[in-house]
Image (tube, grey):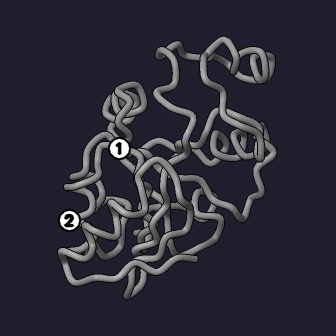
Amino acid sequence: ESPAAVQRIIDLKGRPVGMGMPLLLAETSELGAVAGEISDVVWSLTQRFWPGSLTLVVRRSHIVPDLVTGGRDTVAVRVPAHPVPRELARGLGRPITGTSANLSGQPPAATAQELHGWLGAHVDMVMEGGASPGQTESTILDVSGASPLLIRRGAVAEDAIREYLAEMDKDLAVA
């Protein structure tokens, strides 16, 4: 709900505007606020892999601004396993933008101290939430169309997703 804050993150990271930003939710039940249509497959995936490192690309609802989606009709969403972003979203009463703690194209910071060294002079605050649980990016699965499409391999194994989808008689395509 703060376009200026989202723009500041985009500028700070050097992130292309058309790339969009993922939204982090406190709870799976909040998906309906940011997603236009939610299929049974999507709900099932959230029950199996959230909280966790699976980012789902879904059709966006009308409340999600173009700046967050990069002008697309879809939005990337996730309920992270780490308690800090979930509590921030819960405390604010709405999703937060969630992107890796780095400059665009660089590896993410593993600690608050490392992040402060990179961006400290350009941000208002760096929160200490403990060491990052892993350096592997989230897996991105586009579920906005008829068939699930693996966009990026990451922390959730492709085989685990493929096997889970097979239980629902769904195939996984790979971009």
* Mark 2 residue type: Ser
Farthest-out residue, bottom:
146
SS for dot 2: helix
- Reply above or below: 30 against 122: below
Q: Position of residue 17 (x, y in %)?
A: 74, 59
- Reply above or below: 27 against 157: above
- In this rendered view, identify the residue nearer to me: 5 or 60: 60
Q: Residue at x 51, y 31 (%)?
A: 134
Q: Residue at x 70, y 17 (%)?
A: 114
Q: Quadrant of the C terminus?
A: bottom right
Q: Residue at x 26, y 62 (%)?
A: 45
Sooner in the amino-acid sequence: mark 2 or mark 1: 2
Local packing at callout 2 (Cα closer than 10 Å; few below 14, some 14-19, many 20+) is: some
Q: How many marks?
A: 2
Residue under circle 2?
44
Q: Residue at x 41, y 70 (%)?
A: 58
Q: Position of residue 11 (x, y in %)?
A: 79, 43
Question: In the displayed structure, does residue 65 sit left or right of residue 15?
Answer: left
- In this rendered view, identify the residue nearer to me: 93 or 150: 150
Residue under circle 1?
52
Q: Position of residue 55 (x, y in %)?
A: 44, 56
Kindly identify which numbered label has been placed on residue 28. none
- Reply above or below: 27 against 48: above
SS for dot 1: loop
**Where on the picture, by quarter, is residue 148?**
bottom left
- Reply above or below: 66 against 3: below
Question: In the displayed structure, does residue 45 sit left or right of residue 52?
Answer: left
Q: Position of residue 129 (x, y in %)?
A: 47, 16
The alpha-carbon separation of the residues under discs 2 and 1 comes to 14 Å
